[in-house]
Image (cartoon, helix red, strand yellow):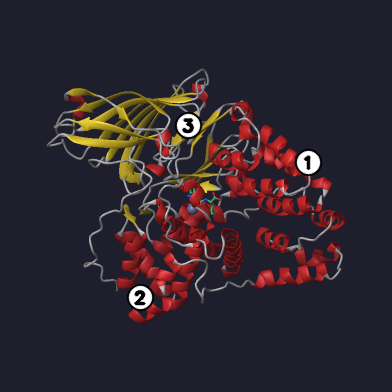
Amino acid sequence: MIASSNFPHFSPPADPHSYAQGPDLPHLRLDLAVDFARRTLAGSATWQLASPLLAATTLVLDTRDLRIERAEALGGHNGDFTAGAITALPCALGAPDAVLGQALRLELPAGTQAVRIAYSTSPGAAALQWLAPAQTAGEHPFLFTQSQAILARTWLPCPDSPGRRFTYEATVEVLGPERGQLLALMSAENPQATAPDGRYHFRQPQPVPAYLLALAVGRLDFASISERAGVYAEPATLPQAAHEFTELERMIAASEQLYGPYRWSRYDLLTLPNSFPFGGMENPCLTFVTPTIITGDRSLTSLVAHELAHSWSGNLVTNATWNDFWLNEGFTVYFERRIMEQLYGRAYAEMLQVLGEADLRHTIEELGADSPATHLRLHLAGRDPDDGLNDIAYEKGCLLLLTIERLVGRPRLDAFITEYFARFAFQSMDTDRFATYLTQTLLSPAEASQLNLSAWLDGPGLPPGAPVARSARFAAVDAALARLVAGTPPADLQPITKEWSSQEWEHFLRGLPPTLTATDLARLDATFRFTASGNAELLAAWFPLTLRAGYAPAEAALENFLLHVGRRKFLVPLYRALLATPGGRARAQKIYRLARPNYHSVATSTLDEMVGGEMVSGEIVSGE
Ligand code: BES
Ligand code: ZN
């Protein structure tokens, strides 16, 4: 049904967040030693060209905080560059930029087949978090990377742009006395057991962009879930993780049924220590997840569906630059809810949609209804993408797809999306290219004018006519809230609340009037035990209420949460709520001083400004 043969050739847009230039680099060979004592990765990155250079050419790579030891051009022919000439290259590092880092400029002679760069990382490399044993669930150190959006360049010299892809192979050697007990994993084909000599080999045969490079090293065990899916976690966490994620294979099967084959061989999860700054990260073959979604009742697994969906939206069809981030995240949120609908039914997916729309309205309000930050297409040149990326891409992006769904019907939209993933697999996509493809292959002229795509892409807030989700289950929650506000004692609501899911509780907590007093909260807590909840989403919705009301019995639990959880999505609103209380700044700073060593740089870079205050950065030593 889709006539795409005449679809115009695409020349990728310039990426404002990368210095990279020069010949294609279709393959990377990485050789790294992991040194926990020094907190460095050291070794070499060898970038292979598609064919020997016919003429001298300049190559520019991204780096940030790297120590470049040496660069060499490798000659040779027929792909065997190891046997050929080796030419030492002068390395010219450009002026450092706080966000973009430093361009590494190399003049490659004719005949160059590959470029080898020997380097080491700095202990403060922003992508890396080195954890002391006390910061893990066990008794060994831990290392993990977080490369998205532009942090890959802090652990290897690379073309760090989502529009540039390469296959890779890696050798990772874990150094030190514990080498035999630590397992290394990457966003690639992975080992399932620890190697006594601490040496690991990896292969990613599908071309990936640099932001999907990932490495983790720790005392990790593996549990199989199906032939092609499993979970890695620290031994103390593995049984709960394996129990929480048993539906993984069903999620993969549902995804394939929706939008075509899973193209990455295995799909495993790695449950990280608590300091992981995100909920999840879609590293190919090995999604990284926060342990805060392990609740015991599988109630927060939509996050896994989300990261899995990125195996299509994002990892197959990739945003060309961070300005097109909504193409990664908006599709993924839509896809995530379709997976959840397939597994748990329409009513469940509706709850997720209503919660998402509430988040969206809240974000639009916060950013300002006419703020350019609420456009789907972003203009992040000159800014740190990490500051510029927000909920809009996720929820407004998803809402655009729901609007199209309503316009053309599910069967047509589903066929379009399936075709889109197949046609543009392993390619990048930008907003204009998508708009052209959509209007040429899916929409009739009448549908296109009804949709008004440009209002979605380049207009603020929500275009008129954006759909509004309804949830019958939330209507029951609203009724309970109304009774509560009218004076019904919490205990009398228990017959209704008994069967509530995490989502219904979330809606309930968000719907509580902000005027509740400490006494009101004490009564709620006595019945519903929020302060003692093991569900991080519920705690994160409860604590702002307790802070506003000055409900003292929740103080210790909040402190404990802030000291142990590193997920930025929770930390930012909680510190903000804490700062807004009387005497809150001093308390926030006291907690932050203790907690900061447990946070990843992604979290501290946001929080330092917010909470840091007069804290001298030298005084806050990360690590131990
Ligand atoms: N790819 C993102 C995480 C990300 C985005 C890292 C931008 C760095 C820059 C991931 O897929 C994601 O969206 N995670 C969410 C969870 C999701 C269910 C909304 C998160 O971490 O909260
Ligand atoms: Zn995502």
Cα distance between the residues tagged 1 and 2: 55 Å
Identify the mark at residue 556; answer none if there is no mark: 1
Label 2: which secondary element: loop
Left-right relation of 50 to 565: left
Contact between labelled residues 3 and 1, with CB atoms less than 8 Å apart: no
Q: Residue furthest left?
A: 54
The residue carrying pointer 2 sits among few (fewer than 14), some (14 to 19) or many (20 or more) residues within 10 Å by Cα, namely some
Q: Which residue is mark 2?
A: 443
Q: Amino acid at mark 1?
A: Ala
Residue placed most toward the observer, 64 or 312: 64
Label 1: which secondary element: helix
Image quadrant in which the C terminus is located: top right
Contact between labelled residues 3 and 2, with CB atoms less than 8 Å apart: no
The residue carrying pointer 1 sits among few (fewer than 14), some (14 to 19) or many (20 or more) residues within 10 Å by Cα, namely few
Contact between labelled residues 2 and 1, with CB atoms less than 8 Å apart: no
Q: Amino acid at mark 2?
A: Leu
The picture places residue 102, in percent across and down from the top left corner, at 37, 34
Q: Amino acid at mark 3?
A: Ala
Sequence-wise first label, 2 or 3: 3
The picture places residue 433, in percent across and down from the top left corner, at 32, 62
Q: Residue furthest bottom?
A: 446
- Kindly tell me whether mark 2's CB lies below 8 Å from ligand 2: no
The picture places residue 280, in percent across and down from the top left corner, at 53, 47
Image quadrant in which the N terminus is located: bottom left
The number of numbered badges drawn on the structure is 3
Residue placed most toward the observer, 393 or 202: 393
Q: Residue at x 83, y 46 (%)?
A: 552
Which one is in front in this view, the residue at disc 2 or the one at disc 3? 3
- Residue 133, quarter of the rendered image: top right
Q: Which residue is mark 3?
A: 125
